[in-house]
Amino acid sequence: MPHFVYILECADTSLYVGSTNNLEKRLKEHNTSKQGAHYTKIRRPVVLRYSETLPSLGEARAREAALKRLTRKQKLALIASSQ
């Protein structure tokens, strides 16, 4: 089953990095559910700006950790290069 790593842009323009096995469901949770991450709950609405598909949970978590280490400028460059 594929997994996804994603970058969200919050209403305050901050960026949030996460991973999931169901991107559509997770995005809905971030915007509407009490199950969304606390960080995004108080910064709604959020917009999906970037995603990658990876073959396994382990690879998705490793990529998520790598993306979280990027600076904001590097994340924005990654988003821009994917569009």
Image (tube, rainbow, N blue to C red):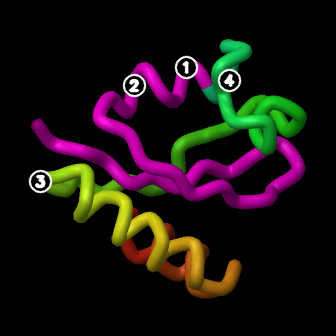
Q: Residues within 10 Å of mark 2 (few under 14, many from 20)?
A: few
Precedes in sequence: disc 2 or disc 4? 2
**Residue 43 image point, x, y percent:** 85, 38
Upstream in sequence: badge 2 or badge 3: 2
Amino acid type of the residue that numbered disc 4 sits on in the rendered structure: Asn
Q: Is residue 83 left or right of residue 74?
A: left
Is residue 18 rendered to the left or right of residue 46? left
Of residues 59 and 31, the one nearer the viewer is 59
Q: Secondary structure at mark 3?
A: loop
Residue drawn at x 70%, y 59% as measured from the top left? 15
Find out whether the residues at labels 1 and 2 contact each other: C-beta distance under 8 Å.
Answer: yes
Q: Which residue is mark 4?
A: 31
Numbered badge on residue 55: 3
Up the image or down, 8 lies above or below 80; here it is above
Q: Which residue is mark 1?
A: 28
Q: Earlier in the sequence, mark 4 or mark 3?
A: 4
Pointer 3 local density, CA inside 10 Å: few below 14, some 14–19, many at least 20 = few
Mark 4 touching mark 3, by CB under 8 A? Answer: no
Report the mark closest to the observer, 4 or 3: 3
SS assignment at label 4: helix
Residue designated by label 2:
24
Q: Residue 83: image x %, image y %?
A: 39, 63
User: Within the image, what quadrant is residue 31 found in?
Assistant: top right
> Residue 15 magenta-drawn?
yes
